[in-house]
Amino acid sequence: MAIEKALLLIADIGGYTRFMKHHRFGLAHAQDTVAQLLEAVIDAAGRFKLAKLEGDAAFFYAVGEDFTAFSRHVADIRRAFVSKKEQLIVDRMCTCEGCMQVAGLTLKFVAHAGEIAFQKVKRYTELAGVDVILVHRMLKNDVPVPEYVLMTDAVLGKLDPELRRFAHGIEHEFESMGRTATHYIDLNEIASALPQKLAPSLPRKLWHKATKELRSLPYLLGLKEPCQDYRNVEVVDSPKS
């Protein structure tokens, strides 16, 4: 297996509250909403390559040890996420829970630098190694703010000093990894200029509604299970009468 130095980044969408299992309509629309947001995130990732989609998160990597554009890429991804979220709100014509909760959706990042191995399984290439495991462990953390970049020392040390001063140290005990020094930056403290909000448009709203219903159809018909692999969409059983 080829081993490379790489910067690892996971962009994770959260913010949905509980859904009842029998609310398939809302879950189907939640599935489509997250898919659209992930598409915007991926399109804005710049030099980062998509390793894989993991439910409501996108796992990226960039081979090499040059992190000079890291903060710009994170800012670009977040700007694209916010822009798409605002568009979904402006174009919304549906009042189901999957559509009405869009305003509360958030985006967080975890980042680590280390070594990765490219492992080929049939026609798929997977990233493997201890550092890949660690960056995934970082998703379960004690960061006290909803939107942030959580990073290890290896990433913090490469940041621009102006940005580094916003970092808050926090030590974690990650499963099977032991005590790990990490640092987080509250994205709302360093928010850059966001795109101008879209003006309402009835034709765009109608197109959005039609395409959403079409994409949601397999889930509504039960051909696919909505939100099945999403970590941050909590689905609970309906109460027994």
Image (spheres, helix red, strand yellow):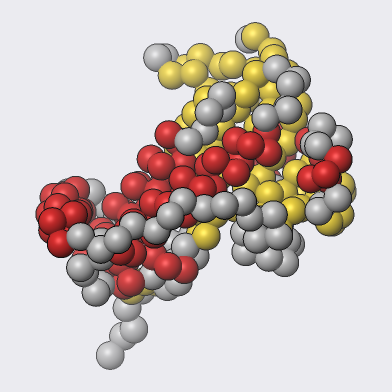
Of the 4 image quadrants, the one containing the C terminus is bottom left
Q: Residue at x 81, y 53 (%)?
A: 166
Name the residue furthest top: 2
Name the residue furthest bottom: 241
Q: Residue at x 51, y 14 (%)?
A: 120
Q: Is residue 27 above or below residue 158?
A: below
**x and y percentages locating residue 47 in the rendered image:** 56, 24
**x and y percentages locating residue 102 in the rendered image:** 39, 65
Of the 4 image quadrants, the one containing the N terminus is top right
Task: Look at the image and tell me whether residue 112 can be seen.
Answer: yes
How many numbered marks does the figure carry?
0
Q: Residue at x 63, y 37 (%)?
A: 72
Quick one: 187 or 142, which is closer to the camera?
187
| Location of residue 219 by image quarter | bottom left
**x and y percentages locating residue 130 in the rendered image:** 73, 30
In the rendered structure, the answer to whether residue 134 lies left or right of residue 170 reads left
Q: Residue at x 83, y 44 (%)?
A: 162
**x and y percentages locating residue 85 in the rendered image:** 40, 57
Quick one: 182 or 65, which is closer to the camera?
65
Task: Look at the image and tell me whether residue 54 can be seen.
Answer: no
Quick one: 199 or 58, which is closer to the camera?
199
In the rendered structure, the answer to whether residue 188 lies left or right of residue 49 reads right
Q: Is residue 24 above or below residue 181?
A: below
